[in-house]
Amino acid sequence: MSLLTTASMWIIPCLILIVLVIATAKRLPTYELFVDGGKEGIGLAISILPFLLGMLVSIAILRASGALDAIIGLITPFLSFIGMPADIVPLALVRPISGTAALGMTTELIATHGPDSFIGRLASVLQGSTDTTFYVLTVYFGAVGIRKMGDALKVGLLADVIGIMASIIVVTIIFGA
């Protein structure tokens, strides 16, 4: 086993052990705090369920209605001008909405084009270079009761656009088109 593999296997158990040792040294009721955290986590999961369900239904409607394919058809000429493969657009559009849907699209792209293809590499880099902005805003902001999220949405989408552009540039420079 390599050093990196061994370290990655031990990092989480060691972090948990450190937290437990520090809590015990401070004479905190570690087990009771753990149970309280579990109760709070279950309550939070139940409270975000409606927001999560709404997002998943919205994504399914977008894909099933053909709206996603229509959007791609409209912007394909621009994409070919800037050197972005049209196959990657659904991933770029869905990634800010749902990480699970984006992972499914990445898997499809890699299965279709291969992991060592330009599109496969670009999909992999894009998957790690952007965030699920709408998911974060609806689920987490909704769970804590934040209703005004205009600035967070603008910054999140700007970060997504920069992540997409950086992915295309970096993959093109490193692997070529």
Image: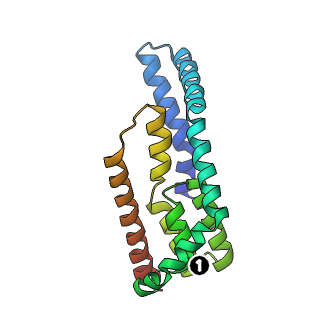
Q: How is the image coloured?
A: rainbow
Q: Nearer the viewer, residue 68 or 97?
A: 68
Q: Dot 1: within a 10 Å radius of its alpha carbon, few (fewer than 14), some, or many (20 or more) residues?
A: few
User: Residue at 64% of width from left, 79% of height from top?
Assistant: 113
Q: How far from the left and from the top, in percent, is residue 87?
A: 57, 77
Q: How far from the left and from the top, in percent, is residue 119?
A: 55, 78
Q: Nearer the viewer, residue 83 or 23?
A: 83
* Residue on which the image places disc 1: 116
Q: Specify whether 97 is left or right of 149.
A: right
Location of residue 42 with respect to 168 vertically, above or below:
above
Q: Specify whether 89 is left or right of 22.
A: right
Is residue 47 in sight in this rendering? Answer: yes
Question: Where is the N terminus found, in terms of image quarters?
Answer: bottom right
Q: Amino acid at mark 1?
A: Asp
Q: Specify whether 14 is left or right of 158.
A: right
Q: Nearer the viewer, residue 39 or 2?
A: 39
Q: How far from the left and from the top, in percent, is residue 45?
A: 58, 32
Asked which secondary structure carries label 1, the reply is loop
> How many numbered marks, from 0 up?
1
User: Residue at 36% of width from left, 43% of height from top?
Assistant: 149
Q: Specify whether 148 is left or right of 113.
A: left
Is residue 176 in sight in this rendering? Answer: no
Q: How far from the left and from the top, in percent, is residue 35?
A: 58, 19
